[in-house]
Image (cartoon, coloured by chain):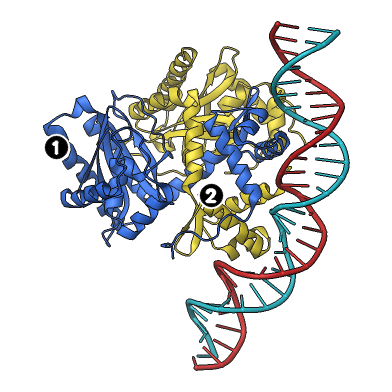
Chain colours: A yellow, B blue, C cyan, D red
Amino acid sequence: MNRTADDDGVRVGATATAFEIVQALKELDGAGVSAVARHIDTPKTTVFDHLKTLEELGYVTTAGDEYRIGAGFLELGGYARNQMTVFEVGKPQVDTLAGKTDQHANLMIEEHGVGVFLYTAAGENTVRLDTYAGRQVHLQTTALGKSILAYTPRDWVEAILNRHGMPAITDRTITDREELFEELASIRERGYATDKEERVNGMWCIGAPITNSDNEAVGAVSVSAPKNQVQGERFRETLPNQVQGTANVIEVNLTYS
Amino acid sequence: MNRTADDDGVRVGATATAFEIVQALKELDGAGVSAVARHIDTPKTTVFDHLKTLEELGYVTTAGDEYRIGAGFLELGGYARNQMTVFEVGKPQVDTLAGKTDQHANLMIEEHGVGVFLYTAAGENTVRLDTYAGRQVHLQTTALGKSILAYTPRDWVEAILNRHGMPAITDRTITDREELFEELASIRERGYATDKEERVNGMWCIGAPITNSDNEAVGAVSVSAPKNQVQGERFRETLPNQVQGTANVIEVNLTYS
DNA sequence: AAGTATTTTCGGTCATACCAAACGGTCGTG
DNA sequence: CACGACCGTTTGGTATGACCGAAAATACTT
């Protein structure tokens, strides 16, 4: 039911503007009425009406003199995440993976054609990153996402690329479609994916897919680390084994739940 | 600017219905158009229009034949949480608290008069709970929330109680206003709060406030455990010390950031 | 093949989302 | 201290589109 490009689309325009305003709040890291209005090129009064409504409903808060995204979204998002079995099963495994490697370990799913970080665990002495739970990224820019794409039907992948494009995030990001498909093929051979500074400069990643009985990806796990800490043998042998091991454990546990 | 009861309120009705529908999806754990329409007593066609827009915008997904809350909310909520310094500073401390006690450790803030679980960490061998990150609860039903209320101006507390009421969640929940204020006073004397099955049967909690330089709560931390595991001295001495210690560390770290 | 449930399309209509103009407050600045 | 510049907010009119009834597709049982 889900394979063709989406239908016509937005039918309630007011909801669209409401979320446009929320997005603006995010991009501006909090802002006042006028700043938002300027940012999305919309009359002040319209923005005002929406912000007041969203505040009343509990999805926007006022901190001092500016509006910010409120806890209402966290409630809904946290609930949604909690409902997912991949999360329930995967979280503890990702935790132990982070512990064993003393690096960042992550869990990702695909939704609406983009990669969604479901959970991120940090080791003891790890660098600070911009990857919070919920963060959305282009699939082809991470080892996680490429793992997922490698185990997704080709026409589906094509549709995703058409919809979201292949922008360069760093100068190492894959931007050529054929290059991507070749890489996906070799991921299928090896069973795991790598990412050398394709989304974050200085960071290398190893990801492995979590597949179901139809051999399609339902998610992926990864370890990411500053490149100097994972040179040589560790990047080629140890880490891939640990990441794939974690993915397999999750797969097994998924079949019994 | 924030102390009186809120202003008039909702100005964009369409947004209100949109979120009403999302709430219905949550309460029904996913549902189809008709089920939602029935649940909130609204024409099917209206619900249909809204669900399609929300899906198009990425805030609702279709899993099989039913709509579910999508990752868009997690993105916004995760972002909002990530922006909060209490979270940034508190998370690692809550993690170590959970490790030391081998029990659930939690971080809560107040927003719009309700308690919001910002983060929850579990020990190795802990029971499964219904407290996910983002979950909202009545403040007076948890040790966390009572810690916060104890360090909140009285008229503010009154306003919160007026707005959200004091429903009984278990048969131990405080439902009497005077009883609550007496307890808040003794919390201020002791410096920490307790909760004996006031929100979840069988669970006991110890919470301590995180205060700012004005001695007002900006949040709270807690440990919660099955009551049989924390009887006697541990509940009266060891745990309170550990929880208060964690709260203090967070307070100190907050002043330098 | 008919019956009951669904999701979805189609159009009309009246409420309302949107917006221009104006008001009151606060903040710098000359 | 007046001035302009900017802010959030109130007000009221209007054209738009949110809302919804009726009915057509579609799916499942029986």
Report the disc number at residue B236. 1
Q: Is residue B34 left or right of residue A28?
A: right
Q: Is residue A24 left or right of residue A97?
A: right
Give whichever of B153, A126 is nearer the camera: B153
| Spot occupied by residue B106 in the image (x, y as percentages of width and height) | 32, 38
SS for dot 1? helix
Residue B106 in sight in this render? yes
SS for dot 2? helix
Q: Amino acid at mark 1?
A: Arg
**Image quarter of residue A8:** top right
Same-chain check, marks 2 and 1 = no
Quick one: label 1, few (<14), some, or many (20+) residues within 10 Å? few
**Which residue is rendered at x = 49% and y = 13% of the image?**
A255
Report the disc number at residue B143. none
Q: Are marks 2 and 1 in contact (CB under 8 Å)?
A: no
Q: Is residue B231 left or right of residue B89?
A: left
Q: Quadrant of the N terminus of chain B?
A: bottom left
Tell me the residue that label 2 is attached to: A57
Residue A165 in sight in this render? no
**Which residue is rendered at x = 51% and y = 35% of the image?**
A117
Give whichever of A141, C26 is nearer the camera: C26
| Spot occupied by residue A161 in the image (x, y as percentages of width and height) | 69, 34
| Spot occupied by residue B162 in the image (x, y as percentages of width and height) | 40, 52
**Which residue is rendered at x = 32% and y = 24% of the image?**
B127
Q: Quadrant of the C terminus of chain B?
A: bottom left
Q: Amino acid at mark 2?
A: Leu
